[in-house]
Amino acid sequence: MSTLEIRDLSVSVEAKQILAGVNLTIKAGETHAIMGPNGSGKSTLAYSIAGHPKYTVTGGSVTLDGQDVLAMSVDERARAGLFLAMQYPVEVPGVTVSNFLRTAASAVRGEAPALRLWVKEQKEAMAALEMDPAFASRNVNEGFSGGEKKRHEILQLELLKPKIAILDETDSGLDVDALRVVSEGVNRVRATGETGTLLITHYTRILKYIVPDFVHVFAGGKVVEEGGKELADELEANGYAKYVGAAAI
Amino acid sequence: MASPPLDGTKFARVLSRDPDAFGAITGREEEWRFTPLYRLRGLHDGTAVVDGTITVDGAFETIGPDHPLVGSALVPADKPSALAMRDFKEGQLVTVDGELTEPITLQVKGSGETSYGHVVIDAKPFSKAVVVLDHTGTGTHVGAVEVLVGDSADITLVSVQDWDDDAVHLSAQAARVGRDARFKSVVVTFGGDLVRLNPTVTYAGPGGDAELLGLAFADTKQHLEHRLLVEHTVPNCKSRVTYKTAAQGVEAHTVWIGDVVIRKEATGTDTYELNRNLLLSDEARADSVPNLEIETGEIAGAGHASATGRFDEQQLFYLQSRGITEGEARRMVVRGFFHEVVQQVGIPALEERLDAAIEKELA
Ligand SMILES: Nc1ncnc2c1ncn2[C@@H]1O[C@H](COP(=O)(O)OP(=O)(O)OP(=O)(O)O)[C@@H](O)[C@H]1O
Ligand SMILES: [Mg+2]
């Protein structure tokens, strides 16, 4: 059973402090939702865990099953079992989806999957997310619509089977059908019980499909409130006003 | 027939078979300002002793400077080119008649000597072929290529510069595209100390279509320069230019010049040129100058795009965040960068060879 432990994590971007002591523990099988106002540092948390070079960790620790995540390179983190579904997935010209997926799966699994089995696995995973097979031969994220990019992120989630998955606003920009399809994908991964999920979102609508075990309110660069799924409904009704005030103190 | 003069345009230049028509090259001229003259081994000022040969293998007829087809597509635009056209000892004439399914390959192999060369490809009307010029070995070589693309012919010229690291190669590659004919040029430059290619296209009749693809990878101390000129002088012709280069290492330098002129008579012209350069290390350099001169408003389309950049941090992060190592991520991005050109080549065997050559550069 894997555990991601974030302790007192402080992070700055270009000398500006964004995260101010984040504490969070995510275990395999659990689903945590993080909700918080724009600019509160949610993506910063996600990117920092993934190791984006733009972010400088100024204090605290992140460990995965006791291993120091912050000492790992970006690719080592992924191979250790971390996965980030990005808020804004990146276009990679000239690199096809199928080439990308197979290279990533080979890297994460430590060996190239047998070609015949792989073709089948990729095909089935795409079908489950109701993705046109033609996407396999398109360049990564190039010309994808917002919703298609998010499906492609979840496709990677399903194929890479990480220990900890961080989903940064995967629900934003999805129409109702896409929201259902993407949520089902996330739920298939959750159902294995082997992946811990951190779901960053602004909307409770996705939480109807992916029911969280814990909800955290994020404001001013840290977790300011924790509760069960009922906390999400309260946030939807009352907004973040009281937490934004609290964080400022 | 001579190329139409460029007088009155910003591309006006001396065009002559007489080497004495050209003044001394100082390096301040627009067309020479990027070229390190001291590495030309005297080719530019007539001090080079050109007494060597270069081996050419393939199916052709041997010709000399007096052959009537010499100068029918190319009029020299600089002194080295004029000297070479006057003094070359053995040129090659390839005549294309009918539709050929197999490529015609000329293996041009240098063995360290200083030489001139001249290749003429005479493609008869309605003929179709792929002609490959494969440059390997080493030496100092000025080699012109003239392509006469007959009416309704379909000719692909592939010029691969896979020289050893110490070769110097200057080459004017002129195509004259007939009525309703198709010409595709694929230039691939990976090897050589200094390579300077001047592909030019003129049209002999309306309906001509020219596609110029280029790919170059400069390593430490390599100067790879490609200067293109497309002259639209007749109505309803099309041109597409796509060149991509990468440079890596100290004094690695690529230069791309894309000149396109649409003369008053060339109504209905459709042209677009694109150049992208990727700098893989801090010391590498790329120069890119697109030039479009349009004398008529009655065209179908004209545009250009040029950009030079470094590795995209976001792309590398995205790939690495999926477990792919930094080295492999960089290779994927570079391969992807060139892929857009490679996939337009349309000759599977050559595409494989290009992929392999790119792989070798990245190793
Ligand atoms: N390069 C930078 N320089 C200065 N500030 C930055 C930089 N990058 C991000 N920030 C700031 O960091 C803060 C946190 O941004 P982040 O993207 O983590 O917020 P978020 O909670 O994900 O917001 P949203 O809900 O809009 O996605 C913002 O105020 C943002 O402007
Ligand atoms: Mg965000």
Image (cartoon, coloured by chain):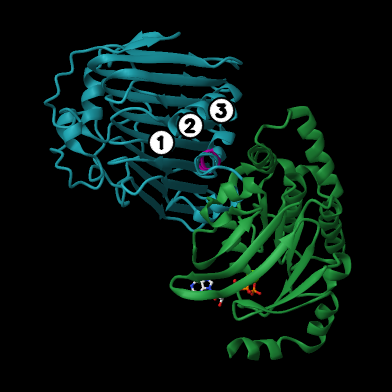
Chain colours: A green, B cyan
Q: Are marks 3 and 2 on the same chain?
A: yes
Residue B177 shows up from this direction: no
Q: Quadrant of the C terminus of chain B?
A: top left
- Where residue A181 appears, as percent x and y from the top left, is 86, 57
Task: Return the disc, 3 or 2, that comes first in the chain's sequence.
Answer: 3
Range shown magenta:
B333-338
Q: Tell me if label 3 and label 1 are in contact, CB under 8 Å.
A: no
Residue B46 left/right relative to A91: left
- Where residue B54 appears, as percent x and y from the top left, is 29, 13
Q: Quadrant of the N terminus of chain B?
A: top left
- Determine whether the residue tagged by mark 2 lies in a helix, strand or loop: helix
C-alpha gap between disc 3 and disc 2: 11 Å
The residue identified by callout 2 is B358
Q: Amino acid at mark 1?
A: Phe
Q: Is residue A96 above or below residue B289?
A: above
Q: Nearer the viewer, mark 3 or mark 2?
A: 2
- Residue B111 sits in quarter: top left
Mark carried by residue B99:
none
C-alpha gap between disc 1 and disc 2: 8 Å
Mark carried by residue B217:
1
Q: Tell me if label 1 and label 2 are in contact, CB under 8 Å.
A: yes
Query: Ligand 1 near label 1 (Cβ, under 8 Å)?
Result: no
In which quadrant of this rendering is ligand 1 seen? bottom right
- Residue A143 sits in quarter: bottom right
Q: Amino acid at mark 3?
A: Glu
The residue identified by callout 3 is B351
Q: Which residue occupies 46% across, 50% down? A: B311
Bin the neighbour count of mark 2 within 10 Å (Cα to Cα): few under 14, some 14-19, many 20 and up: many
- Determine whether the residue tagged by mark 1 lies in a helix, strand or loop: strand
